[in-house]
Amino acid sequence: AKPGHGGMLPGAKVTEAIAEARGVEVGETCHSPPTHSAFSDARGLCRFIGQLRELSGGKPVGFKLCIGQKVEFATIVGAMIETGITPDFITVDGAEGGTGAAPPEFSNHVGFPMKDGLSFVHNILLGAGLRRDIKLIASGKVLTGFSMVRTAALGADVMNSARAFMFALGCIQSLKCANNTCPTGITTSNPVLMNGLVVETKAVRVENFQRNTLKNFFEMVGAMGLEDPGELSPRHVMIRMAGGSTSKSYEEVFPTMEEGALLRGDAGETGAEIQAVWDEAQEILKNTR
């Protein structure tokens, strides 16, 4: 994830096919700015979602973000209620995500980790009464069956995994993603280096990894005595606290908000921080009408 920072496709990787798809010249560095030309605030984002849904004939529309300032996301949720326009899905990326082409300082130090960001988004949508209407997708080092259990327990409906499948393809973390010199052929548009990515054999490895990871995930869910992954909740996962002498459930660390609690103003002691963020966001929306 690169919160607050746009991406860049180096010119060395822009082939004729990429240039045609992106609408740039061959060899031209392609910048993706951190801002969007179609909107500049939370209400504008909601209206743009509505516009995209209409223009696409009702196809699912959503957005991806890495949580930075909590009040900014709370303002977006408030704008959803105000405009009556909600996305079909929100992808919550963790600061631990990102590609080999991401700026190292941003990958290492900017944004909330996936667990914290996902829990916050899940709870504020619950408190605002919108959780049933929006699917949550989570990404950020989801590598194993257990990491899927942990992520689902914190509220994810769907999980994205990039890093694990890169490894299944044969990524050796040479950190050449941005240079077009990836020795395994995975992140290069150089035809010679691309020969290293033998689809016929790598496809088998990817399929094996996916099948066995899901098998482990469902076995863990069954071992908990559950019949469906949708039954997972924060109370099913334990975490060892700093110092190693005590353990707590995710429910104790990331308390679940009652549905509609933020709208009623009764989030209680465990939800006091989120309630304060929500109230601040409502003031921002009020003052920018």
Image: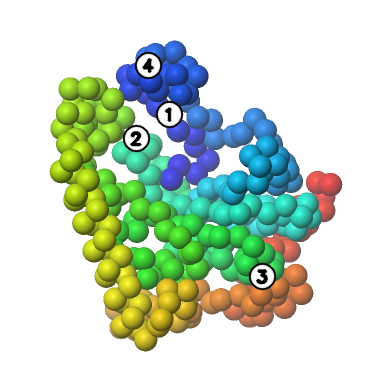
Whichever of callouts 4 and 1 sits on the residue coming sooner in the sequence is: 1
Residue at figure coordinates x 21%, y 32% from the top left: 185
Q: Are marks 4 and 1 in contact (CB under 8 Å)?
A: no
Name the front one of labels 4 and 2.
4
Residue 112 appears in the rendering = no
Q: In the rendered image, which residue does mark 3 sit on? A: 127
Q: Are marks 4 and 2 in contact (CB under 8 Å)?
A: no
Residue at figure coordinates x 35%, y 77% from the top left: 221
Q: Which dot marks residue 8? A: 1
- Say which element carries label 3: helix
On the image, the x and y values in percent for residue 57 come to: 66, 42
Which amino acid type is shown beneath numbered disc 1?
A: Met
Q: Can you name the residue that lies furthest to the bottom here?
A: 225
Tell me the CA gap for discs 3 and 2: 37 Å
- Mark 1 Cα shell of 10 Å, populated few (<14), some (14-19), many (≥20): some
Tell me the CA gap for discs 3 and 4: 49 Å
Tell me the CA gap for discs 4 and 2: 21 Å
Whichever of callouts 3 and 2 sits on the residue coming sooner in the sequence is: 2
In this picture, is 122 found above or below 77?
Answer: below
Q: In the rendered image, which residue does mark 2 sit on? A: 101
Q: Which dot marks residue 16? A: 4
Residue 144 appears in the rendering = yes
Q: Are marks 3 and 4 in contact (CB under 8 Å)?
A: no
- Say which element carries label 1: strand
Left or right: 69 in relation to 115: right
- Say which element carries label 4: helix
- Mark 2 Cα shell of 10 Å, populated few (<14), some (14-19), many (≥20): some
In this picture, is 279 found above or below 222?
Answer: above
- Say which element carries label 2: loop
Whichever of callouts 1 and 3 sits on the residue coming sooner in the sequence is: 1
